[in-house]
Image (cartoon, coloured by chain):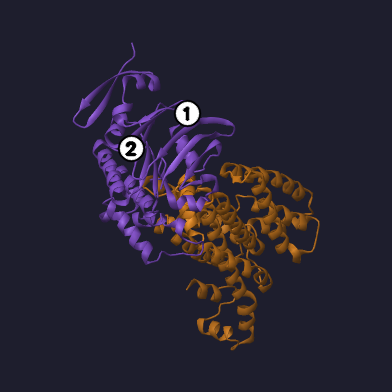
C-alpha cells in the first residue's frame, strides 16, 4: 500500500491505473518516464536501504549485546563520511561517490575490528570503544575538510551526511542490490548464533559456538549491509537503531523472528519516511525525517521498556 | 565417560589459580566442589571447558586430552551452566531448550528435525516444566528459569554436567527439588556431575564425593562421611565447626572463631 501510494505521490500525481499501465510500459509516455526513471528506482532504493539498515542494526545489537548499537557504530559513518567529504571538497568525480563510500565504510570497520582483536579473541568493549575513537578521529578530519571546502560543495556534502534518496536511480541500485540481498539471505542463517550469544559468552561457548568466528561473521555481514545502504542513501540515521527495538517489542528476543522482521519494518519505515520527505512543499533529505520522527519514537520505546519488562537485546 | 584430572593447573594469563589438581570423575558419579571464595572452584570448571588455558598437567575426556577436543566435540560431551544465567530473555522456554541442540546442528540447519524435537520435549519433561513450554523466560520465577536452563543442558545430551552454584538464587524448596532432579538424571540418564556448591550441607546430602579446594589446591576428596571433619574445615575455611550426625547424614555447623 505504501509502495503504491509512494509511486502515485509526488509533484505530479499519477492514478493507480496509470501506475499499472506505466509499469507495463503502456499509457502516457510522461507517466512511464516518471514511474520508471524517478519513482520506481527511488522506491526500490528506499526498500533496499531500509531493510539493510534494519537488519544490520539487529545483527549488531545482538552481537554487541547492546541496545544502543547502530549500524554506524563500528566506524561506518566515520569511514564513508570522510571519503564522501573528501571526494566532494576535492571535486573528485561524483559518480564514484557510492563505491568510494562503500569502500571507506568497509575499510574503517576492518581497522576497528583489527584494533579489537587480541590473539584469537575479539573484545566487545574494545570493538565499541575502538569504533567511537576512530569515529571521532575521522570526524575531526572530516570537519577540517568541510571548513576548507568551497561554499557550494558543503551543501552537497551535507546531503550525503544527513542521508537522502533524492534522484537515486538504477545506477546505485545496480551496484548494491546483490550485496544487500546476499547479506540479508546470509543473515537469516545467523539467527541461532545470535540467540546463542544472547545467553552469555561462556554458555554460548559451552554450546559449541566459537565467539571469534561468529563475531567476525556477524560483524562482516552487518558491515556489508550498512556500507551498501550508505552507498545508496548516505548516512540515514535512526532506522538501524530503532527498527530492531521495535521488532523486539512486537515479537520478543528470538532472532529467528527479529532478523526478518527488522528487514521488513526497516524497508517499510524508510519508504514511508521518504514519502513524507518528498510530500512537503520543499523536499527534505529523508535522513532528517527519520531522525525527526525516530527520536520521539525511540524515547517512547525506552520509556515503555522501563515500565514493562522488555529484553534489551 | 570418565573425566580425569592429571596434575591439572589453570588460570588467567600466567598466574595459576588452580594448581596441580588430580582426581577422577567416574561414570554416574556426583562430585561437589567446596572451598572458600577465591579458592578456584569456578576456575576449575572454566579450565575444564577450555574457556581458559591449561597451564600445566592435563585433563582427559574419554581417554583423549581436552586439548585435542574441538569446542564442538567438547560441547557434545560436557554441558555447563554458569552461576549467572541471563533471565531477561524474551524467548520461549521451548526455544531456549532447543538451543541445547546447537552442537549437533550445522550452520545452515535453520530448523530442528523430529529427533531434535523429541529430545527437547523429553528434556522439558525431565525437569517438569511442560506447562511452561510456551512461556517467555522473563515471565518465570528464578527456580523455573534454573530448570529451563537445566532442560537446555539435558537437550545437549551430555555425558557430563558441570554446574557452577546452581542453587544460589533458589529458595530452600527449589534447592532440594533441583538437586533431587539432578540425582534422577544420574540414575536415569547415566550422566556424571560436578557441581560447585557454597552450601556444604547440601553437598554432603547429595554428592557422592566432596572435593575441598584451598588456594587452588585440592586438600581432600572423599565421601562426605570422610571429608566432613572439623580439621578439614579449620584448614579450608579457617573456622571452627561442629559436625553433627543427622537423619540426612553429616551436617556442619560453623562456630565463630574465638
Examine the rendered structure and indicate whether residue A289 appears above or below residue A141.
below
Which color has been applied to chain A in this rendered view? orange
Q: Residues within 10 Å of mark 2 (few under 14, many from 20)?
A: some
Alpha-carbon distance for marks 2 and 1?
Answer: 25 Å
Instruction: Please tell me which residue lies in front, B54 or A122.
Output: B54
Task: Give how far across and how far down residue A245 sits, in percent.
Answer: 46, 54
Q: Mark 1 points at which residue?
A: B216
Q: Same chain, marks 2 and 1?
A: yes
Instruction: Please tell me which residue lies in front, A49 or A38.
Output: A49
- Residue furthest toward the bottom? A26
* Residue lying at 50% horizontally and 53% vertically, measured from the top left: B72
Which color has been applied to chain B in this rendered view? purple
Task: Give how far across and how far down residue A85 sits, in percent.
Answer: 74, 54
* Residue lying at 75% horizontally and 64% vertically, measured from the top left: A96
Residue B217 seen by the camera: yes
Examine the rendered structure and indicate whether residue A242 appears above or below residue B29.
below
Examine the rendered structure and indicate whether residue B192 appears above or below residue B250.
below
Residue A296 seen by the camera: no
- Residue furthest toward the top? B258
Residue A223 disc label: none
Examine the rendered structure and indicate whether residue A29 appears above or below residue B161.
below
Q: Mark 2 points at which residue?
A: B169
Instruction: Please tell me which residue lies in front, B42 or B74.
Output: B74
Q: Which sits earlier in the primary sequence, circle 2 or circle 1?
A: 2
Task: Give how far across and how far down residue A88 sits, in percent.
Answer: 76, 58
Q: Image check: A174 left or right of A257?
A: right
Instruction: Say which element carries label 1.
Output: loop
Amino acid at each position: 500500500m505504501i509502495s503504491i501510494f509512494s509511486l502515485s505521490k509526488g509533484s505530479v500525481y499519477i492514478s493507480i491505473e496509470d501506475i499499472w499501465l506505466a509499469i507495463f510500459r503502456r499509457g502516457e509516455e510522461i507517466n512511464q518516464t516518471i514511474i520508471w526513471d524517478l519513482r520506481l528506482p527511488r522506491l526500490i532504493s528506499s526498500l533496499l536501504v531500509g531493510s539493510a539498515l534494519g537488519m544490520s542494526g539487529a545483527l549488531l545489537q545482538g552481537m554487541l549485546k547492546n541496545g544502543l548499537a547502530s549500524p554506524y557504530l563500528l566506524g561506518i559513518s566515520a569511514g564513508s563520511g570522510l571519503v564522501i567529504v573528501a571526494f566532494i571538497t576535492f571535486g573528485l568525480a561524483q559518480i564514484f561517490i557510492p563505491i568510494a563510500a562503500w569502500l571507506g565504510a568497509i575499510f574503517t570497520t576492518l581497522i576497528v575490528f583489527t584494533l579489537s582483536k587480541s590473539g584469537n579473541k575479539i573484545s566487545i568493549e574494545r570493538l565499541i570503544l575502538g569504533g567511537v575513537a576512530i569515529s571521532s578521529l575521522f570526524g575531526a578530519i572530516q570537519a577540517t575538510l568541510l571548513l576548507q571546502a568551497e561554499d557550494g560543495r558543503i551543501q552537497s556534502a551535507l546531503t550525503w551526511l544527513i542521508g537522502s534518496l533524492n534522484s537515486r536511480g538504477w545506477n546505485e541500485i545496480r551496484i548494491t542490490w546483490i550485496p544487500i540481498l546476499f547479506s540479508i539471505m546470509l543473515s537469516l542463517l545467523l539467527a541461532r548464533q545470535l540467540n546463542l550469544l544472547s545467553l552469555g559468552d561462556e554458555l554460548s561457548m559451552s554450546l559449541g559456538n566459537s565467539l571469534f568466528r561468529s563475531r567476525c561473521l556477524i560483524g562482516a555481514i552487518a558491515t556489508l549491509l550498512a556500507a551498501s545502504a550508505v552507498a545508496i542513501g548516505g548516512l540515514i540515521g535512526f532506522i538501524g537503531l530503532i527498527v530492531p527495538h521495535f521488532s523486539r517489542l512486537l515479537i520478543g528476543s528470538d532472532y529467528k523472528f527479529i532478523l526478518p522482521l527488522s528487514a521488513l519494518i526497516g524497508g517499510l519505515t524508510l519508504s514511508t519516511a521518504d514519502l513524507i520527505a518528498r510530500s512537503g512543499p520543499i523536499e527534505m533529505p529523508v535522513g532528517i525525517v527519520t531522525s525527526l520522527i525516530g527520536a520521539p519514537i525511540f524515547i517512547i520505546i525506552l520509556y515503555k521498556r522501563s515500565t514493562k519488562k522488555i529484553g534489551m537485546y | 565417560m570418565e573425566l580425569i584430572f592429571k596434575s591439572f593447573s589453570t588460570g588467567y594469563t600466567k598466574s595459576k589459580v588452580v594448581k596441580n589438581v588430580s582426581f577422577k570423575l567416574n561414570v554416574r558419579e556426583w562430585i561437589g566442589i567446596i572451598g572458600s571464595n577465591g579458592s578456584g572452584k569456578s576456575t576449575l570448571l572454566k579450565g575444564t571447558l577450555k574457556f581458559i588455558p591449561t597451564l600445566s598437567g592435563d585433563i582427559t575426556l574419554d581417554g583423549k586430552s581436552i586439548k585435542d577436543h574441538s569446542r564442538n566435540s567438547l560441547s557434545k560431551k560436557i554441558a555447563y551452566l554458569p552461576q549467572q544465567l541471563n533471565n531477561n530473555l524474551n524467548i520461549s522456554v521451548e526455544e531456549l531448550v532447543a538451543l541445547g541442540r546447537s552442537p549437533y546442528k550445522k550452520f545452515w540447519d535453520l530448523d530442528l528435525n523430529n529427533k531434535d524435537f523429541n529430545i527437547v520435549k523429553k528434556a522439558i519433561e525431565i525437569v517438569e516444566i511442560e506447562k511452561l513450554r510456551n512461556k517467555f523466560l522473563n515471565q518465570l520465577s528464578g527456580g523455573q528459569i534454573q530448570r529451563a536452563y537445566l532442560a537446555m543442558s539435558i537437550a545437549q545430551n551430555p555425558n557430563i554436567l558441570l554446574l557452577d552454584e546452581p542453587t544460589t538464587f533458589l529458595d530452600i524448596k527449589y534447592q532440594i527439588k533441583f538437586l533431587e532432579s539432578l540425582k534422577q538424571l544420574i540414575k536415569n540418564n547415566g550422566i556424571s556431575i560436578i557441581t560447585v556448591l557454597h552450601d556444604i550441607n547440601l553437598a554432603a546430602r547429595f554428592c557422592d564425593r566432596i572435593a575441598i579446594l584451598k588456594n587452588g589446591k585440592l586438600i581432600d576428596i572423599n565421601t562426605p562421611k570422610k571429608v566432613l571433619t572439623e580439621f578439614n574445615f579449620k584448614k579450608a575455611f579457617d573456622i571452627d565447626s561442629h559436625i553433627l550426625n543427622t537423619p540426612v547424614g553429616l551436617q556442619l555447623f560453623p562456630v565463630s572463631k574465638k
